[in-house]
Amino acid sequence: MKRIIFVVILVALVGSLFAGRSATPHPVYIELHDSEGNLPNADSLEVNCWLNHKPEQILTMEDSNILYPIKDVFLQIQCSGFNSWDAGDTLHVEVTDKLTQEFIKLELELNFDNYQLFPGNHLQKPESKE
C-alpha cells in the first residue's frame, strides 16, 4: 500500500512540473530600428507572432503580451501569452510599419533562460516593383 501511495505522489509531482511550463513567463526582447537606424513609430507598427507548433494562435499588438517600446528600442513578446511553449520552439515574428511598409520577419529559437534578447534588427524597405 505504501508503494502505491509513493507512486501516486511521484506521478503527481512529476506531472505538476510539466503542467506548469506553459504559464512560465518568458519575455523575448527584440531590438527594432527602421532601415535608416531610427526608432519605428509605435502607432504604425503591426506585429504578428506565433509558435511553430500552434500557427493558429497568433499574438498581435492588441494583446497585452506584446509591448513596444520597452526601454525605447525593444519590442517585448511575453511567451506566457501562448497556451504552451517549450525550449526549442520557434517563435515566428512579423513586424510591419504600416506607414512606410518596411518589414522584418524573424524566426527565433526559444530557450528556458529567464529572458531572451535579440539585438540589432532593422526593418527592411519593400522591394520596388519596377
Image: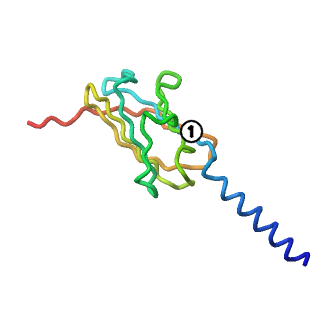
Q: Quadrant of the N terminus?
A: bottom right
Q: How is the image coloured?
A: rainbow
x then y, percent, for residue 83: 54, 51
Q: How many labels does the image show?
A: 1
Above or below: residue 68 compared with residue 52? above
| Left or right: residue 20 compared with residue 60 | right
Q: Residues within 10 Å of mark 1 (few under 14, many from 20)?
A: many
Disc 1 secondary structure class:
strand
| Left or right: residue 54 compared with residue 87 | left
Q: Name, please, the residue furthest toward the left.
A: 130
x then y, percent, for residue 110: 53, 49
Q: Residue at x 49, y 50 (%)?
A: 109
x then y, percent, for residue 130: 8, 36
Above or below: residue 41 compared with residue 9? above
Indicate the amino acid at tag 1.
Pro
| Left or right: residue 72 compared with residue 47 | right
Above or below: residue 116 compared with residue 34? below
Q: Residue at x 55, y 53 (%)?
A: 84
Write down the quadrant of residue 59 in the picture: top left
Task: Report which residue position mark 1 lands on.
Answer: 27
x then y, percent, for residue 25: 62, 42
Above or below: residue 52 compared with residue 41? below
Q: Which residue is drawn at 47% across and 36% down?
A: 63
